[in-house]
């Protein structure tokens, strides 16, 4: 067979077709089309098959990228799927929403003179094809173990762990305070980045494999942590981070100023067919309103683009640093600009204007100063630079911190870091409570889906090792029969 690889010199990079901005603004469907099979094979063939693949090194899951690209280039898609799913529980989700420009693709060595291989789009294509072809099978163990495991949180961290543990034969019970599975995949990230059907089919697959979901069930409220620990041989905490950072200043309490996740959850629920009173009464609906979003991360980008789709009159993003220092993916900033979002870089709110409801934001220009101890440049206001942006809806998207888990769980012995994230032993993933492990954002702080999957997988492996050890140790500890 002729070598199909190393085609980057002859074949230019081609991302999947992106829908025109005008069409995108009218709905919540994903903005990128799927590759046609021939396109996926051709694009995969651009890989240079490096001896030391930097893409793999910079993928948090250490995905075997060069090998599955080669299989895709040779149209051996079922094998490509087997390989890609061996290291990643949700490759089609990562292919859609990983910030590839900072991870695998950003480290593709052919990028120097040629554009990088479109790794994410090929990864998505492989697994979407596998679903279409019926190659994706539920993780149904041949032999079930007697031990059961409780997982708190049905986000990507909890779900990845649940699938890994189910494969190992454990009885897995996932508890979530929401009514649907997915965590931020279902109620945070909007459909134009990740269509809901992609998340819902994973939910079904896990159920088909025998994972039991207990929804509308908040641990600490509906079931105590002590009860949960008594029910299960081990527990994994994968509860994410949900305490929204707030903004102070004059007028900060005015009606019309809302929290990003409330706004996004309402939009996502409405899209799923739910009736959301705060959306129906206009509180969380941007239709025909002048919207200002404060913040520069993924959440802010999702808010501005949701507001555009809801038919806002204008949408402005206010961010205190510059474009180069945005924490969100630059690809999403570009998409937002194409869709009509105005960016005010180096600008921060000083006060919120209005009597009975917000009518505007008074902002100050900022400038970047010298790097602080963390290496990040300080931001300082420029005297006399205040300006006003009219607004009827202000969305605060300044990031998230952990909730008080020791308090919520009634477990004062549960150790947390200074930031409030759960402290774990980084080799075993165990918290300060014996048999209670933790993974995902609740350990790292707000991070990425791909890292939550990685942590969920690693925590599952550690839980298995711990349970195995406990099982072999148990007979020695059992009382000797008379
Ligand atoms: C708006 C937004 C956009 C994002 N976009 C991207 C992106 O494009 N790409 C990317 O890689 N990352 C993105 N992220 C980050 C990513 O979503 C998170 O890093 C990831 O979801 C963390 O996974 P997790 O499993 O740790 O937690 P989560 O996804 O937060 O899931 C935690 C689950 O635990 C449940 N829970 C919490 N407390 C309890 C309790 N006491 N009892 C029962 N259940 C409980 C919650 O209901 C939730 O379902 C985004 C985040 C936000 C907020
Ligand atoms: S999981 Fe994310 S970082 Fe890894 S190969 Fe896929 S898109 Fe790239």
Image (cartoon, helix red, strand yellow):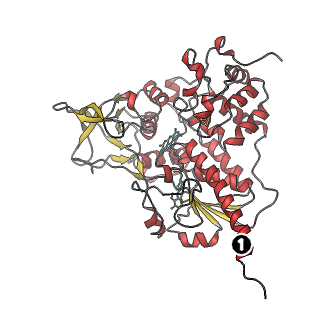
How many numbered tags mark residues here? 1
Q: Quadrant of residue 430?
A: bottom right
- Answer above or below: position of 71 versus 151: above
- Residue at 75% in and 74% down: 475
Q: Position of residue 438 (x, y in %)?
A: 55, 57
Quarter of the C terminus within the rendering: bottom right
Q: Is residue 363 left or right of 1 when viewed as pictured?
A: left
Mark 1 element type: helix
Q: Which residue is mark 1?
A: 474
Q: Is residue 170 left or right of 19 when viewed as pictured?
A: right
The one nearer the camera, 363 or 451, is: 451
Q: Quadrant of residue 337?
A: top left
Q: Is mark 1 within 8 Å of ligand 1?
A: no
- Residue at 84% in and 18% down: 1
The one nearer the camera, 390 or 97, is: 97
Residue 216 seen in this snapshot: yes
- Answer above or below: position of 302 versus 221: above
The one nearer the camera, 442 or 429, is: 429
Q: Position of residue 46 (x, y in %)?
A: 67, 19
| Residue projecting furthest to the top | 10
- Answer above or below: position of 453 versus 129: below
- Residue at 61% in and 19% down: 14
| Residue projecting furthest to the bottom | 482
Residue 120 seen in this snapshot: no
| Residue projecting furthest to the right | 1
Q: Is residue 278 left or right of 362 when viewed as pictured?
A: right
Q: Position of residue 174 (x, y in %)?
A: 62, 59
Q: Position of residue 139 (x, y in %)?
A: 75, 51
Tell me if mark 1 has few (under 14), some (14-19) or many (20+) residues whose alpha carbon lies within 10 angstroms of its own.
few
């Amino acid at each position: 067979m002729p070598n199909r690889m190393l085609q980057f010199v002859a074949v230019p990079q081609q991302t999947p077709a992106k829908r025109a901005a005008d069409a995108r603004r009218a709905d919540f469907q994903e903005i990128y089309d799927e590759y046609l099979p021939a396109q996926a094979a051709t694009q995969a063939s651009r890989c240079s098959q490096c001896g030391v693949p930097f893409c793999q090194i910079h993928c948090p899951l250490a995905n075997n990228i060069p090998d599955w690209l080669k299989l895709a280039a040779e149209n051996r898609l079922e094998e490509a799927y087997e390989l890609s799913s061996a290291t990643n529980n949700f490759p089609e989700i990562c292919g859609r929403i990983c910030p590839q420009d900072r991870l695998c693709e950003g480290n593709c060595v052919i990028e120097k003179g040629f554009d990088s291989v479109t790794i994410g789009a090929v990864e998505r294509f492989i697994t979407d094809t596998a679903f279409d072809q019926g190659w994706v099978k539920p993780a149904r163990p041949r032999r079930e173990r007697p031990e059961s495991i409780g997982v708190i949180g049905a986000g990507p961290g909890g779900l990845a762990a649940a699938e890994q543990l189910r494969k190992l034969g454990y009885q897995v019970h996932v508890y979530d305070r929401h009514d649907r599975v997915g965590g931020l995949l279902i109620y945070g990230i909007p459909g134009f980045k990740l269509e809901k059907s992609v998340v819902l089919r994973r939910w079904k697959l896990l159920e088909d494999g025998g994972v039991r979901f207990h929804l509308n069930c908040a641990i600490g409220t509906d079931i105590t942590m002590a009860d949960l620990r008594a029910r299960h041989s081990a527990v994994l905490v994968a509860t994410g981070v949900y305490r929204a950072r707030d903004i102070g200043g004059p007028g900060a309490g005015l009606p019309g100023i809302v929290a990003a996740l409330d706004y996004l959850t309402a939009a996502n629920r409405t899209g799923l067919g739910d009736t959301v009173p705060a959306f129906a009464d206009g509180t969380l609906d941007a239709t025909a309103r002048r919207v200002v979003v404060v913040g520069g991360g993924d959440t802010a980008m999702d808010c501005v683009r949701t507001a555009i789709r809801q038919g806002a009159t204008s949408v402005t993003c206010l961010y205190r640093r510059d474009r180069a220092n945005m924490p969100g993916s630059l690809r999403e900033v570009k998409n937002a600009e194409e869709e009509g979002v105005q960016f005010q870089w180096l600008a921060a709110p000083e006060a919120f204007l209005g009597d009975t409801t917000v009518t505007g934001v008074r902002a100050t220009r900022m400038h970047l100063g010298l790097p602080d101890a963390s290496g990040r440049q300080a931001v300082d206001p420029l005297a006399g630079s205040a300006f006003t942006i009219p607004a009827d809806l202000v969305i605060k998207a300044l990031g998230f911190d952990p909730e008080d888990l020791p308090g919520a769980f009634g477990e004062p012995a549960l150790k947390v870091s200074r930031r409030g994230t759960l402290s774990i032993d980084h080799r075993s993933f165990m918290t300060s409570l014996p048999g209670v492990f933790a993974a995902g954002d609740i350990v790292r702080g707000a991070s990425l889906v791909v890292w939550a999957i990685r942590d969920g997988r690693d925590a599952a492996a550690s839980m298995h090792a711990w349970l195995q050890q406990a099982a072999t140790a148990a007979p020695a500890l059992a009382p000797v029969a008379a």
